[in-house]
Image: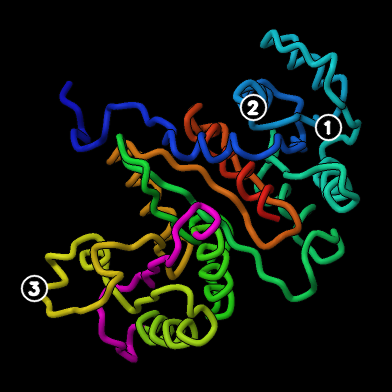
Amino acid sequence: MSDPYPFLCKTPPTVPQRLLDQARRHGVPRVALVNAGAAAPLEGIREAAGAGMAEPILIGDVDKIRDAAAEIGYDISQLRLVHAPHAEAASKAAELARTGEADAIMKGQLHTTTFLRGLLPTRAGLREPGARCGHVFHITAPGADRPMLLTDAALNVDPSIETRQACLTHAVRLAQVLGVERPRAALLAPTEDPIASVVNTVESAEIAAWARTHLPEADVAGPIAMDLILSAEAARMKNYVSPVAGNADIVVTPNITTGNAVFKLMVLGMGCCAGGLVLGAKVPILLTSRSQKAAARLASAALGVIAAGAM
């Protein structure tokens, strides 16, 4: 049978060496793994710990954690275990972060909605009242060290202008921590002209105008279509002049459907490595997935080390 999707990349992703090198210049963060009683999340935290990217704190049903660790041959006898069954695990992780006992939080064997519901409400104490959180993917192509930061493809479903401003701000700050002196950010849209019937184009123009005052350390272009984001030649052909065209460090998407599609196409179609974090809380939050390969889990852990060291 012929391959139905021959355009998909067959090469496994690899973690960019620059990301690993930068992470190793920081201390090892205490990472609270929420609902740790399953093989997949324990394998993820073991990989991170083995690479010097995490000092694990295992939260969940302690008996299930021990059983899962025995299943994969993971010696957890020297690790801190915190008994907090399924519904309580995320709230317990928030408490540890709030009291300074954890430097980062990682998703374990639970649904993302349940995980975030225990961390992001104001009552959890991990964000200031009114503060908006956003998810940022650090995406690198095979053989490349320079990342593209993509926001938001995993948290905010249909973000308001204010939420996209917050996502843009988080991404700019992360880019600077990663060593990009003057980040170039693109506000993704189907065209470069604000058109009333295409709401995102108008909103992107408003966000770009806002950024000129509130993020003067970054070059922000929007609305801007993907061909101009990726290709300086396409920008020249369309007479579009911007330092962002063909050179974007950051792409801000209008909604989670668009962001998630771009992220998955880059991973599956291009073989990119994608590590991701939720930013805007008092500690970085690692949203790992059971379907993620080892490289993506390690990239997320390295990104968490770097973000935690900057907080």
Is label 2 or label 1 in front? 2
Q: Is residue 183 magenta?
A: yes
Vertical placement of 299 versus 177: above or below? above
Q: Element type at marker 1?
A: strand
Residue 99 in the image, given as x and y percentages of width and height: 91, 50
Q: Element type at marker 3?
A: helix
- The reply, left or right, for residue 85 in relation to residue 219 is right
Taking the spot 31% from the left edge, 88% from the top edge, the residue there is 194
Instruction: Name the amino acid, label 2.
Output: Gly
Vertical placement of 2 versus 213: above or below? above
In what quadrant of the picture does the N terminus appear?
Answer: top left
Q: Earlier in the sequence, mark 3 or mark 1?
A: 1
Q: Earlier in the sequence, mark 3 or mark 2?
A: 2
Instruction: Name the amino acid, label 3.
Output: Met
Taking the spot 74% from the left edge, 15% from the top edge, the residue there is 69
Instruction: Name the amino acid, label 1.
Output: Gly
User: Looking at the image, do the residues carrying marks 3 and 2 touch, with CB atoms under 8 Å apart?
Assistant: no
Residue 60 is tagged as 1
17 or 120, nearer to the observer: 17
Residue with the mark numbered 3:
237
Q: State the CA–CA distance, disc 3 to disc 1.
A: 56 Å
Taking the spot 69% from the left edge, 35% from the top edge, the residue there is 108
Residue with the mark numbered 2:
52
Q: Earlier in the sequence, mark 2 or mark 1?
A: 2
User: Looking at the image, do the residues carrying marks 2 and 1 touch, with CB atoms under 8 Å apart?
Assistant: no
Residue 79 in the image, given as x and y percentages of width and height: 83, 22
Q: State the CA–CA distance, disc 3 to disc 2.
A: 47 Å
